Amino acid sequence: MPLVLYNTLGRTANEFIPCRAGEVGFYGCGPTVYNYAHIGNLRAYVSHDLLVRLLRRRGYTVKHVMNVTDVGHLTGDNDEGDDKMVRSAEERGKSVLEVAAFYTDAFFHDTERLNITRPNVVCKATEHIDEMIALVKRLETNGFTYRSGGNLYFDISRFPRYGELARLKPDELKAGARVSIDGNKRNPHDFVLWFTKSKFENQALVWDSPWGRGYPGWHIECSAMSMKYLGEQFDIHAGGIDHIQVHHSNEIAQSEAATGIHPWVKLWFHNEFLVLNKGKMSKSSGGFITLQNLVDAGYAALDYRYFLLGGHYRSQLQFSYESLTGAQNARKSLLGSLRHLAEKQEGVLPSVDGAVCGKAAEHLVLFDTALDDDLSTPKALAALWGLLKDTDVPPGDALRAAFQMDTVLGLDLAKELAILLDAPVQIRGDCAEIETAIAERAAAKKAKDFTKADAIRTSLKAKGIILEDSPQGTTWRVE
Ligand code: AMP
Ligand code: ZN
């Protein structure tokens, strides 16, 4: 069965076919680092992670790029309000870069706790100003810009496809159809490419540009950085549904107007919101829950990941502590079942990359079919439970299939099991081979042959074996 994914562009679910065989370019809009991520934001990043893991399980080489917004994002996506970073820095009595560094670290601490695989490229807006200026220059050369009130704007009247992603109606696009707060705009949907003195006299970070000293509009960073790392056309662009209307519509307009390539991105992947008591959770409203709040309340970060797996990424998910407790209990009982199976195996676990056969394979097919159906994690979880409850499946086969499922679910089952068993989880058949490879790598490192050392690590990684170095030596675990 082919992998079928829903595409916001066109609003249909189709077989996923990448631009280049075997490779996937994936860009997910990253955090604006003016505050902690709330658990709604983290839903977005878990969704990206699940899709990337699934694509890798399907054999694709995925290049995952994520930006970190540390300049230019205003409190309103339509160029309205204050700069989020500047406001946060003022409130905290810190510099913008200090605030950005602090919350970037906090963000990656959260994503690690949620077992989100780190993107291949993490790129900061402030380190890509040259690329943004170069892109805006292309837009200017192609005739898509105008200057007004000191800013440089994108002129949507020059881009007839504007609003295709958001399905904006023609009358919504007419100039003056909606009162714009920014009187410099010819059309309310026009947006800033480059700000100069017209806004925020006290802007902390400014750069020289052909349009004066200033700073970029928010949207240009994602176009500039995604194309820098993935090329002028790529496969998947991800973000929360709130970005369809403005941010992603603007990204498409800028990118396609600059390159002339349509479609810029083949598939738009949008996650629905995590909601609290039917209301949206938002950073700016202040009333938000962080991952640390959940940990402080006695939950493991992976309980939250399990909770998220229970909802389809395109459905709204209502958060409550009762539901989180349900997820916590379910994860506990999942690990209990695995422990039971491992004890029958006397703690020696089968290899994750070994073939799954017999009845276990039938459950794995159900699991894969669920994920191929637009990443249906609730059905995939049900397949995992079906496997564990099936007493006809030999324990070794069940464990092997469960670990294979976990390469997408990301519940870190082997590691969690090792903690429960209070012993490192060993993999039958592969142990000697892995230990030999670790010794070879240590020898290579000692001889300063880092190319060989890295090659050994990479070849083990390809088999799902992760090496962890510490002052005590190197240990390994199943990915
Ligand atoms: P931000 O840091 O505000 O740019 O948001 C980071 C990501 O979280 C974006 O992809 C948003 O679309 C997404 N997001 C924001 N709020 C929620 C929510 N309550 N549930 C799910 N995703 C969200
Ligand atoms: Zn973006």
Image: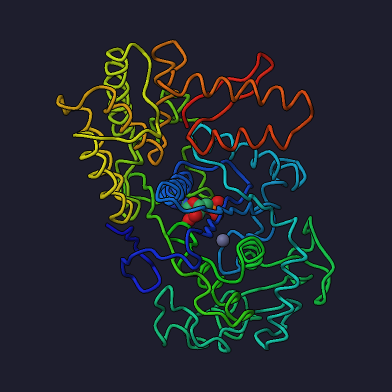
Q: Is residue 458 left or right of residue 23?
A: right
Residue 425 spot, x, y in % from top left:
43, 18
At horizontal 65% and vertical 85% (from top left) the residue drawn is: 144
Q: Position of residue 195 (x, y in %)?
A: 73, 70
Location of residue 401 by image quarter: top left
Image quadrant containing the N terminus? bottom left
Q: Is residue 240 above or below residue 382?
A: below
Q: Is residue 208 left or right of residue 377?
A: right
Q: How is the image coloured?
A: rainbow
The image quadrant that residue 276 belongs to is: top left
**Residue 253 vertical placement versus 1 (above, below):** below
- The answer to which of 460 and 364 lies nearer the viewer is 460
Q: Position of residue 150 (x, y in %)?
A: 76, 77
**Percent position of residue 77, x then y:** 56, 65
Whether residue 81 is visible to the viewer of this picture, yes or no, is: no
Looking at the picture, tell me which residue is in the foreground, 161 or 296: 161
The residue at 60%/74% (across/down) is 255
In the image, is 342 to the left or to the right of 170? left
Which quadrant of the view contains residue 99?
Answer: top right
Count of labels in the image: 0
The residue positioned 32% from the left and 60% from the top of the image is 4
Asked if residue 200 can be seen in this view, the reply is yes
